[in-house]
Amino acid sequence: MTTTIAPPRRRHRTRSGLGGPLQGWLYAAPTAVFVALLFIVPLVVVFQMSASDWPLLGGNRGVNLPDNYVDAVGHRLFWDSIRFTLLYTVITTVILIALGLGLALLVQESTRWKGFLRTAFLVPSALGLASASLLFYVLYSPIAGPFADLMNSWGITFLGSPSGALWSTIFLIVWRYAGFYMLLMLVGLQGIPDDVYEAARIDGASRWQTFRDVTVPLLRPTFALTTIMCVTGSLLAFEQFYILTKGGPDNSTLTVVQLIYNVAFQGQNSLGIAGAISVLVLAALIIINIFQLRAFRRPEES
């Protein structure tokens, strides 16, 4: 009896097996190049500027550390811009999140106007912030605005006083972003299982108790996302104030990013001091975001 030994099977490297890791790197390459060119390289340049004597014209003139940071903190408008930016951030964040949740609860109900209301609230989000700012600049104008005669007869100036300029800009931001935050809140509401609400109704919970004890706790991840986005966007506010107020009147609406712009391209023309302020703002954003993530962490995750 003869036994036949089968020849060893050759292992063929398939096309997919050979190119698997390579394909992954190729897919990730465009994003990696995009991030490197638009984030990492500018970040390195900003750090280099913050440590150098770097005027707007003339290039790097050598190391100037820590003088740039001392001059940045000692700038006459630095702390005023910090206070105003924080005030604007707190007011905008509270209004947008509260209004976004209210609009989401409104359009969540199955009514015949649900589709129309969702579209109407979301339409302003499709308009660019700069375009929206120009639109409101015309609306607020006492010369060319549609309410010019009424404003002149009543002595109203939307942008002529510090409080008026602040609230006029906040109204623009709320009009522009309320629909967007409504959409985020609506996604969070739709992610809550109906069984939870059914159990609350069986237990005899009222609508307010259901909202307080069921909806709000289960919206914690959505609150975390919206708060981080709103706080970060508000701390970096620039276009709306630059177009509407130019930081006025009397630098009362000057934000930190506007101060960076003014130091770099107007007045001092110092990219070194502007870079130092940028680094300080970046560090503050990282700390604030870490604090927010810890604050919205579930007790069991802590």
Image (cartoon, rainbow, N blue to C red):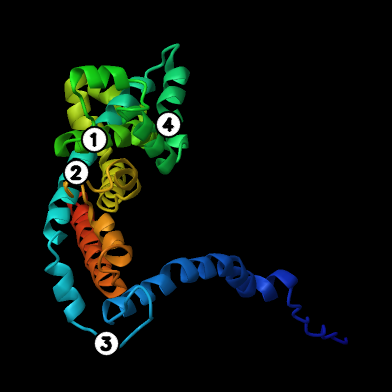
Labels 4, 3: front one: 3
Q: Residue at x 28, y 72 (%)?
A: 270
- Label 1 residue SS: loop
Between 283 and 150, the one lying in front of the other is: 150
Between 11 and 232, the one lying in front of the other is: 232
Labels 1, 4: front one: 1
Of callouts 2 and 4, the N-terminal one: 4
Which disc is residue 208 wearing? Answer: none
Which disc is residue 249 wearing? Answer: 2
- Circle 2 packing at 10 Å, graded few (<14), some (14-19), many (20+), is some
The answer for how far apart the CA atoms under marks 1 and 4 are is: 22 Å
Q: Could you tell me the amino acid type at mark 3?
A: Val
Q: Could you tell me the amino acid type at mark 4?
A: Pro
The answer for how far apart the CA atoms under marks 2 and 4 are is: 27 Å
Image quarter (top left, top right, bottom left or bottom right) of the C terminus: bottom left
The residue to which callout 3 is attached is: 63
Percent of width and height locating residue 238: 31, 50
The answer for how far apart the CA atoms under marks 4 and 3 are is: 47 Å
Q: Give left or right: position of 23 versus 199.
A: right
Q: Could you tell me the amino acid type at mark 2?
A: Pro
